[in-house]
Amino acid sequence: MEDIAAAAGTSKSVFYRYFGDKAGLQQAVGEVVLSQMQRRIHEAAQSAQTPREGLFAMVSAYLQMAETSPNVYAFVTRHSAAEQDGGQTTIATAGALGHFFDSIAKMIARPMRAHLGAGKEAVIGYWPNAAIGLVRNAGEQWLASPVSPEKPDQDAMARQITAWLCVGIAPELTDVQ
C-alpha cells in the first residue's frame, strides 16, 4: 500500500480510508479492470461473422489487454495477499473474477449453441469453462515467457489458442476406444 500511495502522490491513509486494505483495493481495481476486459471482449465477439472468428477475436482481445498491462492483469486475477499467506479467502475478489468468467462463458456458449444445434447441450455446458481455462492458462504462460525468437507475438498466440479450441492440438488423432 505504501508503494501504491507513493506512486499516486498521496498518503497510505487515503487508500485505507477508501479501500480498507490491500484486498479492498484489489477488489475495486479488479471490478473496474474486469469490466473493461468484459466490454472489450464482448465488442470483439460482436464483430465476428463465424463462431471461430468470434473465438479468435475474444482470445486476441484478452491477450492484448493482459499484455498491455501485465502487472494490472496479475493484480486483479491472482489471489489476494490474504489467500497467498494462508489466510481467509477474499470472497469479493474471487466473486468479481468468477462473475467475469461466468459472463465470458455465456458469451462463448451463445454462438456455439446456434452453430452446433440441438442435442449438444452437454458439450456446450462444459466447453466454455474448459475453453476459458485453456485461454487463461496458455495466456498466462505466454505472458510469463521471456521474449525470444521462439515466443509467438500476440496475434500468433491468439491464432494458436483458437486453433487448439477449434480443432485440438493433434487433429489427426482419433478417439481410442
Image (cartoon, rainbow, N blue to C red):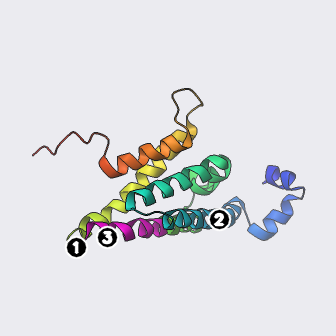
Q: Residue at x 67, y 52 (%)?
A: 72
What amino acid type should be assigned to the residue bearing mark 2?
Answer: Gln
In front of the other: 154 or 4: 154
At 84% from the left and 51% from the top, the residue drawn is: 7
- How far apart are the two marked residues, 3 and 1, measured between alpha carbons? 8 Å
| Residues packed near mark 1 inside 10 Å, few (<14), some (14 to 19) or many (20 plus) | few
**What is the residue that sits farthest to the left in this orientation?**
177
Question: Considering only order in the chain, which callout, 3 or 2, is on the residue closer to the N terminus?
Answer: 2
Residue placed furthest toward the front = 49
Which of discs 2 and 1 lies nearer the camera? The answer is 1
- Which residue is at the front of the view, 10 or 45? 45
Disc 2 versus disc 3: nearer the observer: 3
What's under tag 1, amino acid-wise?
A: Ala
Task: Answer left or right for 61 relative to 2.
Answer: left
x and y percent of residue 64 in the render? Answer: 59, 50
What x and y, as percent, mark residue 150? 51, 28
Front one among 144 and 88: 144
Say the numbered circle drawn on residue 84.
none
Query: Measured along the vertical axis of the image, is residue 15 above or below residue 118?
Result: above
Which residue is tagged 2? 27
Q: Does the residue at mark 2 contact the one at mark 3 (Cβ under 8 Å)?
A: no
Membership of 115 in magenta stretch: yes
Q: Which mark is residue 118?
A: 1
Query: Is residue 161 among what the camera can see?
Result: yes
